[in-house]
Amino acid sequence: MIFTYWTHPLKDAPDSEKEWKTLTSAFRSFGDEDVLPLLDQHRAGLQDLFQRISLPACKSDIARLALLYQFGGLYVDAHAAPTTGGPLIRTLGRLARLECVLFGKSVEDNTHRIDLVNSAICARSRSPIIGKALNLILDNLYAHFEREQETSEYIPYNLAVVSGAWPIGTVVLDRSRKPFVVKDELRDRVDILHLSEQSDHGFRLYRHYKYRGKGQHWRELQNHNRLFIDK
């Protein structure tokens, strides 16, 4: 299965959906009504916390991992568009021998890091790696929620670190090495595919951005919006 998350897909489907469904009948858009029933199996009361999140990008970070854990397959952001079927089949085919396929870019600077993205993730159903990453994210969210409950003031946060690709990297990467590499114990379970203009894994990121209004990117919103809505 190939899927994306969109808060209300039945009311306002993402622009990319038509392209994906033209290529494959295996594509699906999941919404909140699909995600909410899955949440409490990961943490009691998570449905309530999920609905109090103010940034859609943060909700999406949780939803994609909860859906991957439940169903497996390839998750892609709503801005991603398909290329051709062959590379897509090869990407999904990696799950025959791997538990999880991640995507990232090498960063040529003194940090020696792999810049993982969570805009696309491929995993088997019930992947322990996905489960661990989701639990790290939930720990971060509950910790920040408790801090916000203690004050009415804005408390700074970095969504990439709280719920984005960073927790996934924490599970998968050995950051004690330079350059970063997949942890030894996960090398036969995880692969990281390089993203570039020359590579083709069956999709292209950042192709559809009509849904993004000016000043509505999470990097901008996180600078002044509290992460959780007060009841």
Image (cartoon, rainbow, N blue to C red):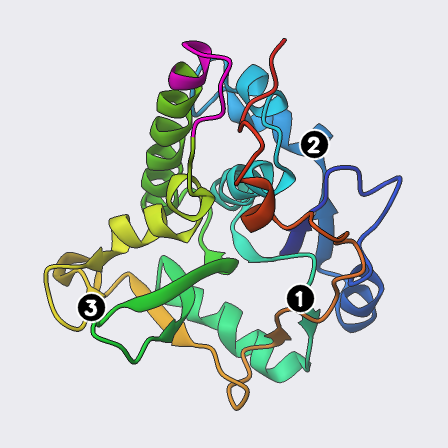
What amino acid type is highlighted by mark number 1? Ala
Q: Position of residue 158 (x, y in %)?
A: 42, 43
Asked whether, in this view, residue 100 is left or right of residue 206, the answer is left
**Quadrant showing the N terminus:** bottom right
Say which label, 1 or 3, has the lower sequence index.
1
Residue at 52%, 68% (x, y): give it. 92
Q: Amino acid at mark 3?
A: Val
Q: Which residues are magenta?
A: 147-155
Using the rendered view, name the quadrant where residue 11 is placed: top right
Q: In the rendered structure, which disc, 3 or 2, sits on the residue that comes first in sequence?
A: 2
Q: Quadrant of residue 113?
A: bottom left
Q: Which residue is mark 2?
A: 32
Within-10-Å neighbours for mark 2: few <14, some 14–19, many 20+: some
Residues under labels 2 and 1: Cα distance?
20 Å
Horizontal side of 121 relative to 205 (left or right) equals left
Quick check: marks 1 and 3 in contact, CB under 8 Å?
no
Dot 3, crowdedness within 10 Å: few (<14), some or many (≥20)? some
Q: Which residue is mark 3?
A: 181
Residue at screen point 58% across, 36% down = 59
* Residue denoted by label 1: 80
User: What's the amino acid at mark 2?
Assistant: Asp
Secondary structure at badge 2 equals helix
Residue found 51% across the figure and 50% down from its top? 72
The residue shown at (62%, 29%) is: 54
